[in-house]
Amino acid sequence: MMRCLLFGFGYMGKIRYQVLRQHPLVRGITIVDHGVDPSTVGLDGLLLPAGAPIPWDETDAVFVCTPNNVTPDLCVEGLRRCRRVFCEKPPGRNWEDFCRIADMAAAVPDHTLVFGFNHRLHPSVQAAKSLIGEGGLGEVLYLKGTYGKSGGIRYRESWRTNPDIAGGGILLDQGIHMLDLFHLFLGPLTVVDAVLVDSFWGTGLEDNAFILLRSEQGVPVFLHSSATFWKHTFRIEVGCRNGYLVASGLLSQTGSYGREQLVIGKRQFEDEALALGNPREEIIHFDRDESWDKEVNEFLLAAHEGRPATHGTLEDARRVMQVIRDVYALADRHVVKRAVP
Amino acid sequence: MRTIQTSASFPLSSVKPLDGLLRYRSYCLERTRQALRGPTRRRQRSPIDGAPLEPFGDVEGLRYLRCPNSGSLFLEELPASASWAKLLQDVSRHRFSSEGFYPGLAQSRTDHVYTPKLEWIRDTLRLQGMHQPIILEAATPPSTFTHLLKDSGMCSEVLVVDEMTVAAGSGHDADAPRVHAAILLESLDRVDDPVALLQAVVSRMEEGGLLFVTALVCSGFDLAVLGLNNLYLCPPDRTNCFSLQGLSRVLTQAGLTLLEVSTPGVLDVEVVRAHLQHNPSLPVSRFERQLIEADAPTHVTLQAFLQQQGLSSFARLVGKKVSLGKGEHV
């Protein structure tokens, strides 16, 4: 049975709390977030009072669900004090932040460190992964991903658009998930070219990122990560030798990304289909997202059993942070500012 | 859970033409009446929830009752199990005889009916990480699907059992080999005790095993619009015509977690159209007639909508026999 310390009770902290409170391995949760009103209904006895010392000695696992600038310090301390840390993405504001976490992890033997890349556990992504390669569709020819959100009227006020706190724009905040999926499908990637623009929000951080990448086998990959996609969009296209897959929509809490589905198309030339270029497709619609449960469950089981986790590993995080580091270096951190409304 | 939609299309005439069906249907009805001349029993309660069945109507004198909670339809009168088994074997042989309508459509049915089912099973096994399973197929022989399944290379072994033997419990053997997956292609529509068949098959499955079920469901478009005027609805092949809700429920009650509940049918609109061509005076509403008389793109859109919303009459379900292990958390 594990006692969990949850840093940050914002959007992600609340999601993690809901999973933890129902998990059979969890016997206690302490929430650390001095921004939360202690009289909040349902948090009696859970919220650490302001000024009280962090109960490190009574903690078996730490969940870091905080803004990016706080993340590295808490991860490092969590690893040092109790060896078991679950950290939301991104792992810090930049490559240097990530390296601080990685260095501490290297210094702590038998640690369990998992980063929150839950998208690879979404049902459409897992189904797509099982169908490529020997799953029947053959090797991947190309990958194309679009992940876009609309921002909203309070977007500029969010810590996510404050360069000092966030460290990066939409690429680091949301595009990082798509980069993780690219790695899931193709392994390590290198940056070929990138264009970053602050086209609408004028925060000094990119609100659109166009990234061209290449796998070690030479497979081309393209990402458009956007905070000016007025219709919330998640879409990943996987072109394969024997067909194609299009995963789109996300089973999110608000449902704003649309119904999660996977289109499976089999390559058909004139000899197999009536009309060339219009092959038979199957569309799988999903109605259950277990990614949050699976992700936390794997972390807790790995921590409990003293083994490395199977996903969201330090290596997974390293790969995406390397790409983001290289993209920002390529764009020289000079985001093209186009217009401020 | 997932649902599946398909863009596949093929004409009704390529798999179950109405003209060919009429001769086969006459044969089925005649043989069913013969089977009912011996000792019979009447079903009074829903196999789904035990609720008293309500009168619904008859198919050329053979009464169907309705489950009040799920809308599922059941033939009221049934002969002894042995007679029913014999009847199913008889009509199955007839379907493949020179007088049946299958021989001339063999290749077309393989392409449009059986191959997509094989792909469905193959893809689902992949998604569930199941490699080279032992598969049980419950059917009334002869089953075209058995050979295709064996030739597919997707399973290490295919065990074929007579669905009526299993449903009657006479094939129950505690030492019978356990299977990783089982297939019931419209078996629940035919057997005299669908719940017994389900329970017997599930008892043969390993924990985590998958059950693949296809069925014609009365909640689907062509059956809902045509009701008992639907010529495809007759015994013994459609002795039970579950609604999608009813079918889902019996699977759940049998100890399965549903992974997929889909209605990827492609023929609902065409089935209604063929019936109206065959008998223009069929009682359908003006709105339904308007839909059926619309142009081809409208039909395509309507059929896609029926698939998306679980409203086609061809249902596919996948259930998983689940038991949580120690320390396992779902």
Image: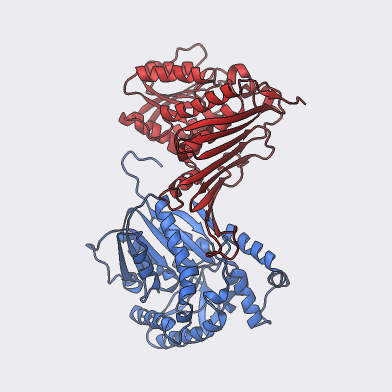
Chain colours: A red, B blue
Question: Can residue B50 be spotted in the picture?
Answer: no
Residue A18 screen position, x and y as percent? 49, 33
The foreground one among B231 and A317 is A317
Instruction: Examine the rendered structure and indicate whether residue B61 appears above or below residue B253.
Output: below
Can see residue A147?
A: yes
Q: Quadrant of the N terminus of chain A?
A: top left
- Outermost residue on the front side: it is A218
Q: Horizontal and vertical percent for residue A42?
A: 53, 29
Horizontal and vertical percent position of residue A325:
53, 23
Residue A207: where, in percent of width, then height? 66, 28
Viewer-closest of B221 and B159: B159
Indicate the quadrant where residue B47 lies. Answer: bottom left
Q: Residue furthest left?
A: B175
- What residue lies at 31% left-to-right and 41% top-to-bottom? B326
- Residue A186 against residue A306 in the figure, above or below: below
Q: Which residue is found at the position 27% from the left and 70% from the top?
A: B171
In the image, residue A97 sits, relative to residue A181, either above or below, namely: above
- A205 to B69, vertically: above or below: above
Quadrant where the image shows the C terminus of chain A: top right
Residue at (30% x, 59% y) in the render: B156
